[in-house]
Image (cartoon, grey):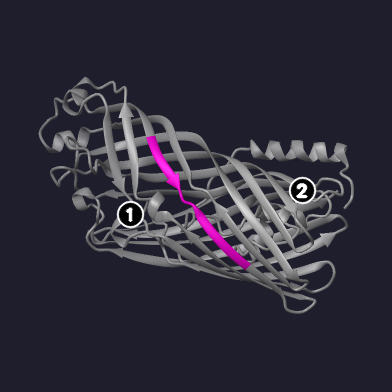
Amino acid sequence: MNRIPYPRLLRATMISFVIACAWVSPVQGGVVNRNGTGARSVGMGGADLTSEGNPMAAIGHNPALLSTVETPRLTLSAMGALGSGDYRNKRGENFSFDQSGAFPEAALAFPIGDSPVSLGLGVNVVAAREVDWIYRDIAGGVDGGTSYGVLEHSSRFLMARAAAAFSYAINDELSLGVSGGLVYEEFQLQAPFIFQSNPILKGFKTALDLDTDGYSANADAGLLYRPTDRLTLGLTYRSPTSITSKGRADGTLDAQLQSIGAAGFDPGVHYDAEVKTAFPQAVAGGIALQVTDRMLLAGQIEWVNWSDAYDTLDITLRNGTNSDLQSLAGKEIRDSVPLHWNDQFVFRGGMEFDVNEALKLRAGYSYGASPMPDSLVTPVNAAISEHLVSAGIGYRVGRCLIDLGYQYELPRSVETGHSGYQAGEYSDSRSKISSHWLSLGVTYEF
């Protein structure tokens, strides 16, 4: 292995952390989890556990891959998407939206001289989802007749991770790796909100603007085993992530109060907000087979433990300014929104074909049954896509590797019969979601 060119490496590290602090705009996606990290992984359907020489895959998924980076490499990547959706409420009214967004990512990987140790730094978006609809609020609430009319229904969820990774090559066949990450989460909701479990406010509807963020930590552990020159096996584990995000909750109860004849009650909702969320532990195994000198096939299976993480969304409101509301519900309001997601298996397959020494072509496919119960699907939370197809291209120019990856989450429609939420606003409705993802990455070899 070559010695590290430290001045150039220092500059690369600074660039990576500038990217890590960059502004991020989440994009609409049918699923919450990413389907691969970096353009090369995107083009192969997210099958990146065995993606040798790939700093983005090492930071984002399997830290043992750092041992396959023979010279220092810096990857800068940009991910963008266009999402669309259709919604039909129980009155037969149809609404649609189209939305786009983008975010940057970066990864730096380098061996430590001639030692078996390799290190990595990077930032990537683990999960991102944003939807912004305008549609009619169906009558509901505690009395069944409360509506806030036609208004914005939006939600935003972002989880970004800045990580440091370490790998150790035990021998030419086996490498082990670990990474530790600082995780940033942002949660926003602007929509009519119906209290689900609070014993005093259950069924009450408020037009709510909720905005919280917070930090936590998690870890990855990975293994890479190459029993032959043509066969590579990978295995990874990601720890669960628990985050308590804090911020504010503002809104109004005016339509609900008017509907029940309590117009003299102060309708304002102004609280400090706390949202407890968890992101699941996951285990993944992958295999790559060099079928010919030019053709590589990769397969991957992931198990995601949603059931222990996405059972309820717990919200606490404190330090309210509305004395009328405090006299009714107390100084602290707690509510739990049902999620009840199921554990999920995701299957991925990808191929890479070397046209010549400079040009590579890629394709992929993934399938994972939606973990969301149909009874809890709404337009603002519809993580319902299941099938994804992808394509990609890679091109080498000197020390630069340029990769472009594309994914299409095929449209999927869910009919919600009897809604599992209070008041039944989303009963007898239909939600349909699809999205296009495009990733461009540039890797420089020092």
Give the residue drawn at x 49%, y 61%: 303
Q: Tell me the residue at 53%/56% (across/down).
A: 82
* Residue annotated with mark 2: 118
Task: Examine the residues drawn in magenta and state their main secondary structure.
Answer: strand
Q: Is residue 278 magenta?
A: yes
Front-most of 79 and 68? 68
Taking depth in this image into account, of 136 and 423 the one nearest to the observer is 423
Residue 341 place in picture, x, y as percent: 37, 56
Crowd around label 2: few <14 · some 14–19 · many ≥20 (10 Å): many
Is 373 magenta? The answer is no
What SS does tag 1 mark? loop
Specify which label sits upstream in the sequence, 1 or 2: 2
- Give the magenta-colored segment's residue range: 275-286
Query: Residue 332's x, y, as percent?
Result: 27, 27
Q: Nearer the viewer, residue 44 or 145?
A: 44
Measured Cα–Cα span from mark 1 to mark 2: 40 Å
Residue 340: give its label. Answer: 1
Please say if 436 is above or below 179: below
Q: Which picture quadrant has residue 10?
A: top right
